[in-house]
Image (tube, helix red, strand yellow):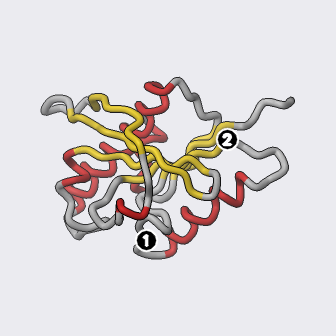
Amino acid sequence: MARKLKILFLAAEAAPFVKVGGLGDVAGALPPAIRSLPEKPDIRVAIPMHSQIDLTRFPRKQTAAFEVWHSHGPITAEVFETKRQGVTVYLVSGEPIRQASHVYTSDTRADGHKYTFFSLAALELCRMIGWQPEILHAQDWHTAAAIYA
């Protein structure tokens, strides 16, 4: 049997978990479509665990807890795992995400801090669980830090 391609799909939002606009539509639909290809790639999605997510709709288990480095000291990240249409979805939580009242705000500094934390936590999660993606599919500026890390 051929080895499956490993893809990590990062996004700030993904339907049906949380959707603000078109990015949520794409991030919700594209991973299951990719997984349905004949090669059945091992695609996994990571999104922030925004307060707008109705967690009662998505059974989940804690997958990991670890520290993400910050110039003011480490920030604890917690990651929860669920499935949707056969795709593993990681919900990343931590103080910068929990503090945010909205998915996006006009406070670019706070959003930058939140999404940088999320991007770095998603990468550290891969190391923690021993899963090395071959493709990093980063959506929009929110996940750009993951490309440079």
Q: What residue is pinned by disc 2?
A: 42
Q: In the rendered image of this protein, does residue 31 appear above or below residue 120?
A: below
Q: Nearer the viewer, residue 83 or 11?
A: 83
Q: For mark 2, give the secondary structure.
A: strand
| Among numbered discs 1 and 2, the one appearing first in the sequence | 1
Give left or right: position of 124 versus 42.
Answer: left
Q: CA distance from mark 1 to mark 2?
A: 24 Å
Tag of residue 19: 1
Q: Residue at x 30, y 29 (%)?
A: 66
Q: Nearer the viewer, residue 8 or 53?
A: 53
Classify mark 2: residues with Cα within 10 Å, few (<14), some (14-19) or many (20+): some
Q: For mark 1, give the secondary structure.
A: loop
Q: Nearer the viewer, residue 33 or 135?
A: 33
Q: Amino acid at mark 2?
A: Asp
Q: Residue at x 18, y 32 (%)?
A: 71
Residue 45 x/y as whole percent: 53, 49
Whether tag 1 and tag 2 are in contact, CB under 8 A, the answer is: no
Residue 73 x/y as whole percent: 15, 29
Q: Residue at x 44, y 41 (%)?
A: 146
Q: In the rendered image of this protein, does residue 16 appear above or below residue 3?
A: below
Give left or right: position of 51 versus 12.
Answer: left
Q: Amino acid at mark 1?
A: Lys
Q: Residue at x 41, y 42 (%)?
A: 61
Q: Where is residue 44, by image quadrant?
A: top right
Q: Quadrant of the N terminus?
A: top right
